[in-house]
Amino acid sequence: MQRVETVNALRAQVKAWRDQNKIIAFVPTMGNLHQGHLSLVQKAQELADKVIVSIFVNPLQFDDQADLSAYPRTMDADIKQLMSVATDLVFTPNIDVMYPQGMEAHSTVVVPGMDDKLCGKNRPGHFDGVATVVSKFFNMVQADIAIFGEKDYQQLLLIKKLVLDLNLPIEVIGSETFRDESGLAMSSRNQYLTDSERKKASVLYQTLMELKNQLEQGEQDFKRLQQQAVEKLKLAGFSPDYVEIRRAGNLDLVNTEDTDLRILVAAYLGKARLIDNIACNLA
Ligand code: PAF
């Protein structure tokens, strides 16, 4: 596996692969890799000849300085993991490569309609930071396809809209959430959980599944269902940000005619802000 740290070195390798007609897939990450990330790399390998992974903790998408400082940086272990799944290239730019003129006056990419609801509402500026850094990465890497995890479902839709709106020449593909045996979605934030919190954490997924069952049985009082789920999470020791039943395609509010739904949750458990979501198709 090659490791490159500059845009010039990255582009030189990408050009060489392009000249050999290789299909290139890109998996952006903030490091602290786990099985969920490796499953994205494996999906990328199924779809492309060469796989590039980036590791960069993007300060622009953190609305909370303490969260940014505490974010685990585990570069050596990350590199080993990427080698273990035969990644072709890892791109590890530093802050000066990403933001040579600083972040203050940097151009910002805003994806309207997708950045101000659900997680966007409680994390001001977060999705602008994501859209900006992902746009930069897409231009730097110039891959054919990019893989994003469905665990960050709002982020996935945001990136799809960004690509559509700006005619970016890349195909964005979602990859199924990787869960442990209890149903808990893999996340770097799980390591903030104590042992007893970790045991409770699967209630998040159970709550989503229960809500899905209720919808499949024909219940349509969305507000009441959401409220019940919030109460259930509170009883289990969570501090929920939201539990929402939304349209799968654009995360708008649902009405009783809608059939293609997504159920999304964000909740604190101790220090960790956990998110999860599942599909619910009533057609
Ligand atoms: O999902 C993430 O890890 C980040 O938001 C991303 C897409 C790598 C952008 O920094």
Image (cartoon, rainbow, N blue to C red):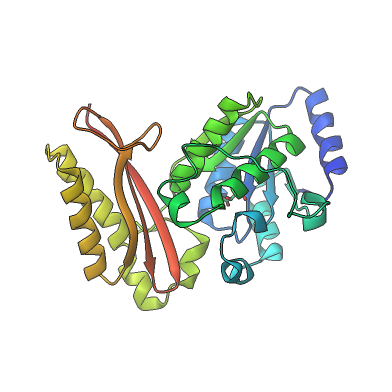
Give x and y (percent) for residue 136: 71, 41
Task: For residue 4, say whether it is visible.
Answer: no
Picture coordinates of residue 150 (x, y %)? Answer: 45, 43
Number of numbered tags placed on the structure image: 0
Taking 137 as reference, is 14 left or right? right
Q: In which quarter of the image is the C terminus?
A: top left
Query: Residue 101: x and y, percent?
Result: 83, 51
User: Toward the viewer: 87 or 127?
Assistant: 127
Quadrant of res 65 = bottom right
Residue at 27% from the left image edge and 35% from the top image edge: 254
In percent of width and height, residue 50 lies at 70, 35
- In this rendered view, identify the residue nearer to me: 109 or 260: 109
Quick check: 122 above or below 143? below
Identified at 47% across, 50% down, the residue is 120
Asked whether, in this view, residue 186 is left or right of residue 253, the answer is right
View extreme (front): residue: 105
Query: Is residue 68 at least partly visible in the picture?
Result: yes
Q: In this view, does 152 lie to the left or right of 225?
A: right
Q: In which quarter of the image is residue 179?
A: bottom left
Q: In this view, does 218 lie to the left or right of 232?
A: left
Name which residue lies at 42% across and 77% down.
194
